[in-house]
């Protein structure tokens, strides 16, 4: 089954980060884009959302977003990497750029 990005997920191009709003709070994953590659150096959830799966849903949305656009993702931070490795979607890669 192909994942789709949730309605409350967005690409905030100005701040170079993906955002997922839950309970009125914003979790985010910063990125750097170069051609068809996205590097994710940082993922953060507000304290009230931690431990509730928000960051995992955010990373699934990032993977779906990347897959829909044929982008390759390089997870640089520990959380992004831990979300990527068990799933090993075709849009995830461990090759740094």
Image: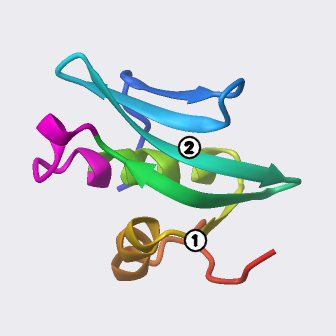
Location of mark 1 (residue): 76
Q: Is residue 79 above or below residue 7?
A: below
- Identify the residue position indicated by label 2 in the image: 65
Magenta span: 46-56
In this view, the mark in front (2 or 1): 1
Q: How dense is the environment of label 1, judged by Cα within 10 Å: few (below 14), some, or many (20 and up)? A: some
> Going 61% across and 26% down the picture, which residue do you hit?
12
Would you say residue 55 sits in the magenta stretch? Answer: yes
Q: Visible in this render: residue 2?
A: no
Q: Is residue 85 magenta?
A: no
Name the secondary structure under disc 2.
helix
**Whole-percent x and y of residue 79?**
38, 67
Q: Tell which of 32 and 89 is nearer to you.
A: 32
Question: Which residue is rendered at x = 16% and y = 48% of the image?
Answer: 50
In the image, taking residue 11 as reference, residue 8 lies left or right, namely: left
Image coordinates for residue 68, horizontal then vertical, percent: 61, 45
Q: Position of residue 53 (x, y in %)?
A: 17, 50
What is the number of the mark on residue 50? none
Vertical comparison of 90 with 24: above or below: below
């Amino acid at each position: 089954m192909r994942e789709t990005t949730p309605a409350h997920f967005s690409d905030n191009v100005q701040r170079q980060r993906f955002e997922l709003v839950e309970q009125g709070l914003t979790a985010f994953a910063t990125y750097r884009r170069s051609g068809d590659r996205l590097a994710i150096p940082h993922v953060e959830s507000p304290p009230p959302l931690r431990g509730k799966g928000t960051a995992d849903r955010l990373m699934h949305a990032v993977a779906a977003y990347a897959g829909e656009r044929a982008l390759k993702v390089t997870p640089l931070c520990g959380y992004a990497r831990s979300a990527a490795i068990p799933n090993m979607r075709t849009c995830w890669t461990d090759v740094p750029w």
